[in-house]
Image (cartoon, rainbow, N blue to C red):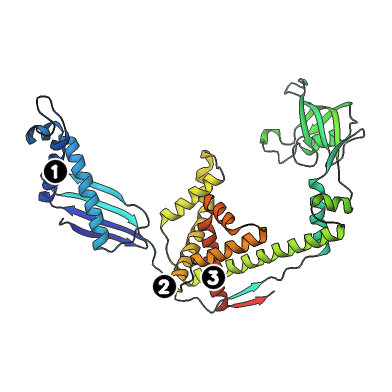
Amino acid sequence: MTITITPTETTGVSRRLQIAVPADTVSAAEEKAARKYAGKVRLPGFRQGKAPAAVVRKKFAEAIRQEALEALVNDAFKQAVESETLKLAAQPHVHDLKFEPGSDLTFELHFEVRPEITLEKVEGFSVTRKEPSITEDAIDEQIERLREQRANWTPVTEKAMPGDMVTVVLSTADADGTLPEGREYKLTLGGGQAIPGIEELIMEVTPGETAERPVKWPDDFPDESQRGVAKLTRVTVSDVKRKLLPDLDDAFAREIGDFETVAALREAVSTDMAAHAKREAEAEVRASLMEQLLEANPFDVPNVWVQQLVEGYAKMYQIPEEELSRFAEEFRPMAMRQVQRDVVIDTLAERESLKASEADIDTRIEEMAAARNVDPGQVYAQLQKGGRLPEIEREMTEERVFGWLLERNTVTAG
């Protein structure tokens, strides 16, 4: 098919092509579509496929033109991609289509192409790797969190304190000063569920008793009309429960896991925290190195890729529809950087032959199986069923790419 292709815009990864299909080619396409219809339609008084072409064209004129148009646009698009050697980032959009009888078919294709980057500078960068430092205080804090997770809420008969869980019946005066019937609330004091003045009133009341007095609403209350207003407030405390932490002894250590003593638990916590800190330090090194590399090798990425990533995260985080616009605006710079990072990794993996092979993936699976003391085939089947094999391949490829980069740049301890 003979067509005319005229580039109208080349900016970054954005492209626009003006396509013109000659009228005789359009006519031939319509004729082909008409013959196709004539061979499959059934009209009254004629056997299937035997109706006169003129009758078929008249009865199915619009459908024939539509089929011819779709075929012409599709063929022209394929020819344009081949002749212009385009690597598309996504399907193009058709704009300004003109399809008049007896005239050329013209339209404009709007699309984005895959970025082609050279990454001329990949050496000479300097990054600092933080040395993990796990203090005794940090270990204590982590163990306290473990105790918090296994705490019990126990009823008490004394006045509530910050951190206690209370059940109260609360009412605040209407505009005319009358106190309506109270409503029951369950609150954890100090958690910001009630304004400070109401929490203070609750902590003045013994379980089973009632108190009322004016309470001043905060000066930074969200409803401006209520800021600084004093309202008569009545509170009845139904019950108070206090969190009791388990004793930090060997029994607690055994409850947490396979630890015979508190000392063994502390050692395990220290080891886990050190491993976590090491992973975080490595992630920071990679992020810093990638940021420098991107600054030294700027390039554009397809907007459609960024948009797809934004939409994917919005779906994963279950962002409400009314908040999608704000989320997209705030998340877009991060999504842009993520897409650029992926392009860099893909480019280096291809250029330096760093992509993880099937043998590499098999070795990783064998290591995972050995750590779990299970058969490698079982681990492989689970990963395959869960669609996680590409994730393993990507993770290993990234490790190899960053390993290659770190060998060529300076990493200092900090």
Tag 2–tag 1 contact (CB < 8 Å): no
Q: Describe the element under mark 3 as helix, strand or loop.
A: helix
Give the mark, 2 or 3, whose residue is nearer the N terminus.
2
Label of residue 30 in the image: 1
Q: Name the residue located 77 percent from the left edge and 32 percent from the top edge.
A: 186
* Amino acid found under the numbered disc labelled 3: Arg
Residue 302 vertical position relative to residue 197 in the rendered view, above or below = below
Residue 291, percent from left and from top: 54, 67
Residue 303 vs residue 223: left or right? left
Say few, some or many: other residues with alpha carbon within 10 Å of mark 2 (under 14 / 14 to 19 / 20 or more). few
Residue 11, percent from left and from top: 34, 62
Q: 291 or 222: which is nearer to us?
A: 291
* Amino acid found under the numbered disc labelled 2: Thr
Distance from the alpha carbon under mark 2 to that under mark 1 = 46 Å
Label of residue 118 in the image: 2
Q: 32 or 312: which is nearer to us?
A: 32
- Nearer the observer: mark 2 or 3; the answer is 3
Label of residue 85 in the image: none
- Nearer the observer: mark 1 or 3; the answer is 3
